[in-house]
Image: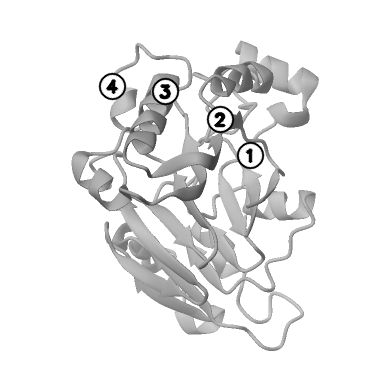
């Protein structure tokens, strides 16, 4: 399995155009790994997880074509994870292709509502919808997908994280979420993930307890990792990368990476390709 990080930031990217904090200023000066677009992940060449507002820019920067994309998963309805105009550009007449392959699109009901609000015509863009609720397990071609209930903003209600299993390797993309509720851990016992991708939007601001009811700080990341080890959801062979950073609460890349190293994890960056 190949996993490409198309973006590793939260909703206002790094640097934010309206901010001169230390993290944003450092990113403008040093660029490199400190420049972060909003989160999106490509598995192999055919499965896209989330499609926020920066998707097109990321594809251009990293020589990514979505012509072979057959499957799409969306975690929830926030704009940094789903921007409906991206999918509308798929329709015939907007590109050179004369045949439009079917795209199996799986997402919670709130995302499907955004498709309707944006007047997406499923037939014109070759879309086949598959509504998802927490704890659903379903097949997408060669992949078996399990939707875990995310601990995220209650007004959304249906935000999920995904375990993706291709029959050989198994990855969990855990964003956006705070520490999982008890019923989620039951689904993760003995999962023995090969790859964990986990968010850290609250970063080093560990005293901001309100934010940690919907996102993870470094303390929350450590708590999640320890719990996963305890129930054999991850093992000594599991690779762990942290993503979904915000400029307001997160330090520059190298400093965050040093923190995660002590947890047996690494800091993801835009354009990173993992061979799992």
Q: Secondary structure at mark 4?
A: loop
Of the numbered discs 2 and 1, the one sitting upstream in the chain is: 1
Of 174 and 90, the residue lying toward us:
174
- The 10 Å Cα crowd at callout 2, few under 14, some 14 to 19, many 20 or more, is many
Of the numbered discs 4 and 3, the one sitting upstream in the chain is: 4
Quadrant for the N terminus, please. Answer: bottom right
What is the CA distance from the residue labelled 4 to the residue labelled 3?
11 Å
**Disc ID at residue 270:** none
Nearer to us of marks 1 and 3 is 3
Q: Which residue is mark 2?
A: 265
Nearer to us of marks 4 and 3 is 3
Q: Secondary structure at mark 1?
A: loop
Residue 88 visible in the picture: yes
* Residue shown at 37% from the left, 68% from the top: 116
Q: Which residue is mark 3?
A: 217
What is the CA distance from the residue labelled 4 to the residue labelled 2?
25 Å
Q: Is residue 20 left or right of residue 137?
A: right
Q: Is residue 199 left or right of residue 189?
A: right
Q: Which residue is mark 4?
A: 210
Q: Which residue is mark 1?
A: 37
Q: Give coordinates of residue 51: x percent, y percent.
A: 54, 55
Residue 111 visible in the picture: no
Of the numbered discs 4 and 1, the one sitting upstream in the chain is: 1
What is the CA distance from the residue labelled 2 to the residue labelled 3?
14 Å
Of 269 and 119, the residue lying toward us:
269
* Residue shown at 63% from the left, 15% from the top: 255
- The 10 Å Cα crowd at callout 4, few under 14, some 14 to 19, many 20 or more, is few
Of 38 and 207, the residue lying toward us:
207
Q: Are marks 2 and 1 in contact (CB under 8 Å)?
A: no
- Seen from this angle, which residue lies furthest front? 236
Q: Are marks 4 and 3 in contact (CB under 8 Å)?
A: no
What is the CA distance from the residue labelled 4 to the residue labelled 1?
25 Å
């Amino acid at each position: 399995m190949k996993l490409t990080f198309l973006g590793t930031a939260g909703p206002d990217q790094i640097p934010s155009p309206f901010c001169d904090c230390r993290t944003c200023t450092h990113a403008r000066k040093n660029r490199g790994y400190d420049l972060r677009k909003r989160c999106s992940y490509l598995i192999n060449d055919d499965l896209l997880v989330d499609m926020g507002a920066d998707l097109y820019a990321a594809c251009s920067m990293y020589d990514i074509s979505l012509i072979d994309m057959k499957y799409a998963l969306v975690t929830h309805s926030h704009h940094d994870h789903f921007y409906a105009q991206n999918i509308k550009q798929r329709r015939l007449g907007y590109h050179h292709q004369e045949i439009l392959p079917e795209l199996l699109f799986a997402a919670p009901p709130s995302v499907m509502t955004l498709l309707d609000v944006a007047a997406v015509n499923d037939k014109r863009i070759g879309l086949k919808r598959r509504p998802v609720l927490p704890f659903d397990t379903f097949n997408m071609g060669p992949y078996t997908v399990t939707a875990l209930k995310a601990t995220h903003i209650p007004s959304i209600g249906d935000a999920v994280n995904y375990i993706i299993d291709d029959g050989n390797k198994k990855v969990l993309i855990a964003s956006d979420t705070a520490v999982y509720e008890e019923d989620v851990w039951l689904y993760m016992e003995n999962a023995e993930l090969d790859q964990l991708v986990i968010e850290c939007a609250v970063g080093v601001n560990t005293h901001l307890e309100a934010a940690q009811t919907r996102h993870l700080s470094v303390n929350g990341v450590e708590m999640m990792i320890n719990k996963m080890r305890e129930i054999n959801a991850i093992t000594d062979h599991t690779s762990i990368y942290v993503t979904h950073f915000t400029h307001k609460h997160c330090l520059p890349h190298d400093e965050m990476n040093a923190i995660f190293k002590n947890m047996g994890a690494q800091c993801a960056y835009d354009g990173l390709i993992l061979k799992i």
